[in-house]
Amino acid sequence: MRTGTALLFFLATAAYGTDAFAPPSSAFASRAPISLAMSTKEKEDTKVAADKKEEDDDAPPVSIGWDSHQAVDAAPESLVRPGESGPEGNYPMRAKFEKMIREAQIKITQAIQDIDGKATFQEDAWVRENGGGGMSRVLCDGNVFEKAGVNLSVVYGSMPQEALQAATERGVDRAKGYKPGERVPFFACGLSSVMHPKNPHCPTMHFNYRYFETDGGVWWFGGGTDITPSYINEDDMKHFHGTYKEVCDRHDPKFYPEFKAWADRYFVISHRGETRGLGGIFFDDLNDRDPDTIFEFSKDALNSVVDAYGPIVEKHKNDEFTEKEKEWQQIRRGRYVEFNLVYDRGTVFGLKTGGRIESILMSLPETARWEYDHHPEEGSREADFLDACKNPREWV
């Protein structure tokens, strides 16, 4: 089964959440007789409700709006609001991070285009009336890549405190300075990517690096790069993980073991009891040192994507493969879809805040496969890969 019925089900539940199972609207419910006389308490309750509605009308929207994106021929020089100071004068980091990821988007897409040798990236740019916007670069049906995308986004919005809590790893209080129930205005800036090659011996790769602030003065960095092959190649995994260990070691020797373990915990498909792939590094809520220090680490990790991934694709892009190997790749793509639509924090955040839907779902492969009660043959390479997903291994 391809991305048909199952995908529509996941999208429906992701988009509607628990509201999909809510009682029918009161507009269709039977109405009780209305009394024309109101008690003093009822009048007070009505006034409180009216005051609350007026406050809500004045408050910033929870969602930035599915239709709030205005297409433009080219993004402005900066998507950060001009002249704003940011929390505690932190505006320079907003602009600095955006500049860094813009440069990385150009560098990475050019490198992937060169590896593919046929297809080119199509760029869509958009802005929002309240500030921010983004640039999506997507390559489809190339010689090497079925689909590859690198998305840049700058977002201004507000969100319920419980949604903000769900968007962070450690459950740390990110609603500092706000009363219970108040929505929290935020700024977010990030670059995310997924590469889906055609050849089952070439791994899928994902990265995301982001900077987040609330108007209450709380800030943090997050991100990581991870790899999802269909088959295990020890040398490839040593190269990929070794590249990121070197990056981490340049900044803090504790980073790689901590962030590798974090990736193994984060990319778990809980209902399957297995990881999406073979990991990498992942970190979130990182604000335990000077922001410029963390910025330099994020920059180094992002700029190492091509070094970590490119040689693996070049090595295997012309490998011969069987129909059975292609079918296994498609089954693993199905697992990729499951994780992204059910568990991925970025996808859930985008759907909850009204992000640009084409950019949010860019991470999904063009084709995937679900087979009923599929189990790989014992002792096969497929079984070995599944074992590594159920029991994460150390590669360096």
Image (cartoon, rainbow, N blue to C red):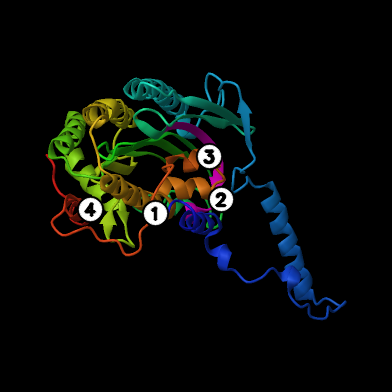
Q: Is residue 371 above or below residue 102?
A: below
Quarter location, residue 191: top left
Instruction: Residue under label 1, please give it.
Output: 338
Within 10 Å of the Cα at label 3, are there few (<14), some (14-19), or many (20+) other Cα atoms? few
Name which of mark 3 and mark 2 comes first in the sequence. Answer: 2
Residue drawn at 18 percent across, 52 percent down? 388
Q: Please name the residue that numbered disc 2 is placed on.
A: 183
Tell me, yes or no, whether the two marked residues, 1 and 3, touch with CB atoms within 8 Å: no
Q: Is residue 17 or residue 362 the one in the foreground?
A: 362
Residue 114: quarter of image:
top left
Mark toward the start of the polypeptide (3 vs 4): 3
For discs 1 and 2, the disc positioned in front in the rendered view? 1
Q: Position of residue 208 (x, y in %)?
A: 37, 37
Asked if the stretch drawn in magenta spans residue 108, the answer is no
Mark 3: which secondary structure?
A: helix
Give the residues drawn in magenta, as a range: 149-163
Q: Mark 4 — residue?
A: 389
Q: CA distance from mark 4 to mark 2?
A: 38 Å
What type of secondary structure mainly makes up the magenta span? strand
Side of 227 where 192 appears, left or right: right
Residue 155 is situated, as x and y percent measured from the top left of the image, at 52, 36
Question: Badge 4: few (under 14), some or many (20 or more) residues near its Cα, within 10 Å?
Answer: many
